[in-house]
Amino acid sequence: MKSLFFYTCLVSLSLIATSCSKEGSTGPQGEEGPAGTANVIYSPWFLSTTMSWADSNMANYSNAKRAIHNAPGVTQAIIDQGIILCYTKGEAAGAGPYQLPLLTANNYLVSFIPAVSKIIFFTSKIGGGATNPFSSNYSFRYVLIPGGVTSGRKITGADKTIEINNTLYTESELKAMPYSDICKLLGVDE
Protein backbone atom coordinates (compact mmCIF):
# COMPACT_ATOMS: atom_id res chain seq x y z
CA MET A 1 0.00 0.00 0.00
CA LYS A 2 2.86 2.35 0.87
CA SER A 3 4.54 1.72 -2.49
CA LEU A 4 1.25 2.38 -4.35
CA PHE A 5 0.84 5.66 -2.45
CA PHE A 6 4.49 6.56 -3.17
CA TYR A 7 4.06 5.68 -6.87
CA THR A 8 0.85 7.76 -7.12
CA CYS A 9 2.57 10.77 -5.50
CA LEU A 10 5.56 10.44 -7.83
CA VAL A 11 3.33 10.31 -10.95
CA SER A 12 1.28 13.28 -9.68
CA LEU A 13 4.40 15.37 -9.08
CA SER A 14 5.69 14.48 -12.55
CA LEU A 15 2.42 15.59 -14.15
CA ILE A 16 2.40 18.82 -12.18
CA ALA A 17 6.03 19.59 -13.12
CA THR A 18 5.35 18.84 -16.79
CA SER A 19 2.21 20.96 -16.92
CA CYS A 20 4.04 23.94 -15.32
CA SER A 21 6.66 24.07 -18.02
CA LYS A 22 7.69 27.50 -19.25
CA GLU A 23 7.60 26.32 -22.84
CA GLY A 24 4.76 27.54 -24.97
CA SER A 25 3.99 29.17 -28.24
CA THR A 26 5.62 32.50 -28.91
CA GLY A 27 3.23 35.42 -28.98
CA PRO A 28 3.28 38.17 -31.57
CA GLN A 29 6.21 40.59 -31.40
CA GLY A 30 5.39 44.06 -30.14
CA GLU A 31 6.17 47.24 -32.02
CA GLU A 32 9.79 48.28 -32.06
CA GLY A 33 10.70 51.81 -31.12
CA PRO A 34 13.96 53.68 -30.91
CA ALA A 35 15.50 52.68 -27.58
CA GLY A 36 16.55 55.53 -25.37
CA THR A 37 14.46 58.34 -26.80
CA ALA A 38 11.09 57.74 -25.17
CA ASN A 39 11.95 59.46 -21.89
CA VAL A 40 13.75 62.49 -23.31
CA ILE A 41 12.07 65.76 -22.32
CA TYR A 42 12.63 68.96 -24.25
CA SER A 43 11.16 72.41 -23.99
CA PRO A 44 9.89 74.58 -26.80
CA TRP A 45 12.04 77.58 -27.63
CA PHE A 46 11.18 80.45 -25.26
CA LEU A 47 12.28 84.07 -25.57
CA SER A 48 14.62 85.53 -22.99
CA THR A 49 12.01 88.24 -22.42
CA THR A 50 9.67 85.65 -20.89
CA MET A 51 12.04 85.46 -17.92
CA SER A 52 12.73 88.18 -15.34
CA TRP A 53 16.42 88.99 -15.48
CA ALA A 54 17.74 90.29 -12.17
CA ASP A 55 21.03 90.85 -10.41
CA SER A 56 22.45 87.56 -9.27
CA ASN A 57 22.84 86.60 -5.67
CA MET A 58 24.73 83.44 -6.64
CA ALA A 59 28.15 82.95 -5.08
CA ASN A 60 31.02 83.59 -7.53
CA TYR A 61 28.64 85.40 -9.92
CA SER A 62 28.12 88.70 -8.15
CA ASN A 63 28.24 90.72 -11.39
CA ALA A 64 25.87 88.36 -13.21
CA LYS A 65 22.27 88.68 -14.29
CA ARG A 66 20.15 85.61 -13.79
CA ALA A 67 16.71 84.44 -14.81
CA ILE A 68 14.79 81.45 -13.50
CA HIS A 69 12.76 79.35 -15.91
CA ASN A 70 10.28 76.80 -14.54
CA ALA A 71 11.19 73.33 -15.78
CA PRO A 72 9.06 70.72 -14.02
CA GLY A 73 10.88 67.85 -15.78
CA VAL A 74 14.11 68.65 -13.96
CA THR A 75 14.19 66.17 -11.10
CA GLN A 76 16.95 65.35 -8.65
CA ALA A 77 17.40 62.02 -10.47
CA ILE A 78 18.01 63.82 -13.78
CA ILE A 79 20.43 66.24 -12.12
CA ASP A 80 22.33 63.38 -10.46
CA GLN A 81 22.14 60.67 -13.13
CA GLY A 82 20.98 62.25 -16.38
CA ILE A 83 22.33 64.83 -18.79
CA ILE A 84 20.91 68.32 -19.22
CA LEU A 85 21.66 70.24 -22.39
CA CYS A 86 20.68 73.90 -22.87
CA TYR A 87 20.80 75.98 -26.03
CA THR A 88 20.31 79.56 -27.12
CA LYS A 89 19.75 81.09 -30.54
CA GLY A 90 19.40 84.56 -31.97
CA GLU A 91 15.91 84.97 -33.37
CA ALA A 92 16.49 88.22 -35.30
CA ALA A 93 19.95 87.40 -36.65
CA GLY A 94 19.27 83.70 -37.24
CA ALA A 95 22.37 82.87 -35.16
CA GLY A 96 22.78 79.48 -33.52
CA PRO A 97 21.57 77.36 -31.89
CA TYR A 98 24.56 77.43 -29.55
CA GLN A 99 25.02 75.03 -26.68
CA LEU A 100 25.50 76.54 -23.24
CA PRO A 101 27.87 77.46 -21.73
CA LEU A 102 28.66 80.01 -24.41
CA LEU A 103 31.31 82.72 -24.45
CA THR A 104 30.18 85.50 -26.79
CA ALA A 105 32.42 87.68 -28.94
CA ASN A 106 31.97 90.60 -26.51
CA ASN A 107 33.13 88.46 -23.53
CA TYR A 108 29.80 87.54 -22.00
CA LEU A 109 29.48 84.09 -20.51
CA VAL A 110 25.98 82.65 -20.94
CA SER A 111 25.33 79.50 -18.96
CA PHE A 112 22.85 77.68 -16.73
CA ILE A 113 22.53 75.90 -13.41
CA PRO A 114 19.89 73.18 -13.05
CA ALA A 115 17.80 72.93 -9.88
CA VAL A 116 14.79 70.78 -9.08
CA SER A 117 11.84 72.00 -11.21
CA LYS A 118 13.78 74.91 -12.70
CA ILE A 119 16.79 76.02 -14.68
CA ILE A 120 18.66 79.18 -13.73
CA PHE A 121 20.08 80.88 -16.81
CA PHE A 122 22.72 83.52 -16.24
CA THR A 123 24.99 85.89 -18.08
CA SER A 124 28.15 87.45 -16.74
CA LYS A 125 30.73 89.83 -18.18
CA ILE A 126 34.14 88.14 -18.17
CA GLY A 127 36.76 90.40 -16.63
CA GLY A 128 34.22 92.27 -14.51
CA GLY A 129 32.10 95.26 -15.28
CA ALA A 130 28.38 95.72 -15.48
CA THR A 131 26.33 92.89 -16.92
CA ASN A 132 23.21 93.63 -18.90
CA PRO A 133 20.24 91.29 -19.11
CA PHE A 134 20.47 88.92 -22.02
CA SER A 135 19.27 90.31 -25.34
CA SER A 136 15.54 90.10 -25.99
CA ASN A 137 16.33 88.74 -29.46
CA TYR A 138 17.48 85.41 -28.08
CA SER A 139 15.57 82.24 -27.25
CA PHE A 140 16.46 79.35 -24.98
CA ARG A 141 15.64 75.64 -24.90
CA TYR A 142 16.59 72.70 -22.70
CA VAL A 143 16.84 68.95 -23.36
CA LEU A 144 16.67 66.48 -20.45
CA ILE A 145 18.10 62.99 -20.95
CA PRO A 146 17.24 60.73 -17.99
CA GLY A 147 19.98 58.47 -16.64
CA GLY A 148 17.67 55.46 -16.90
CA VAL A 149 17.56 55.56 -20.70
CA THR A 150 17.60 51.93 -21.89
CA SER A 151 20.22 50.11 -19.82
CA GLY A 152 20.86 53.05 -17.58
CA ARG A 153 23.87 55.10 -16.76
CA LYS A 154 27.43 54.19 -16.01
CA ILE A 155 30.11 56.46 -14.67
CA THR A 156 33.47 56.64 -16.45
CA GLY A 157 35.63 58.82 -14.28
CA ALA A 158 33.59 61.97 -13.71
CA ASP A 159 31.84 61.80 -17.09
CA LYS A 160 28.32 60.34 -17.19
CA THR A 161 27.71 57.69 -19.83
CA ILE A 162 24.23 56.99 -21.18
CA GLU A 163 23.03 54.36 -23.64
CA ILE A 164 20.91 55.78 -26.44
CA ASN A 165 19.70 53.60 -29.31
CA ASN A 166 22.04 50.79 -28.20
CA THR A 167 25.12 53.04 -28.28
CA LEU A 168 26.97 54.46 -25.28
CA TYR A 169 27.58 58.22 -25.26
CA THR A 170 29.51 60.17 -22.68
CA GLU A 171 28.25 63.53 -21.50
CA SER A 172 31.29 65.11 -23.19
CA GLU A 173 30.43 63.44 -26.52
CA LEU A 174 26.83 64.67 -26.37
CA LYS A 175 27.94 68.19 -25.49
CA ALA A 176 30.36 68.18 -28.42
CA MET A 177 27.65 67.21 -30.94
CA PRO A 178 26.10 69.84 -33.20
CA TYR A 179 22.54 70.75 -32.27
CA SER A 180 21.06 69.12 -35.39
CA ASP A 181 22.80 65.82 -34.55
CA ILE A 182 21.41 65.88 -31.00
CA CYS A 183 17.92 66.48 -32.41
CA LYS A 184 18.23 63.52 -34.79
CA LEU A 185 19.70 61.22 -32.16
CA LEU A 186 17.05 61.99 -29.53
CA GLY A 187 14.03 62.58 -31.79
CA VAL A 188 13.79 66.25 -30.75
CA ASP A 189 11.90 68.65 -33.02
CA GLU A 190 14.35 71.31 -34.19
Image: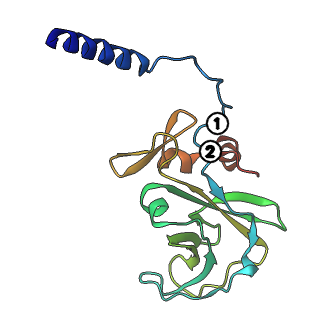
Determine whether, in the image, residue 122 is placed left or right of residue 172: right
Question: In the image, is residue 71 above or below residue 87?
Answer: below
Which residue was labeled with disc 1? 34
Q: Could you tell me which residue is drawn at 15 percent across and 13 percent down?
A: 2
Q: Which one is in front, 100 or 109?
A: 100
Question: In the image, is residue 168 above or below residue 116?
Answer: above
Question: In the image, is residue 96 above or below residue 55?
Answer: above
Residue 181 image offset from top left, x and y in percent:
67, 43
Residue 36 image offset from top left, x and y in percent:
57, 42
Query: Pointer 2 and pointer 1: residues touching (CB < 8 Å)?
Result: yes
Q: Amino acid at mark 2?
A: Thr
Q: Secondary structure at mark 2?
A: loop
Quarter of the rendering occupied by the N terminus: top left
Residue 34 image offset from top left, x and y in percent:
64, 36
Res. 87 image quadrant = bottom right
Which residue was labeled with disc 2? 37
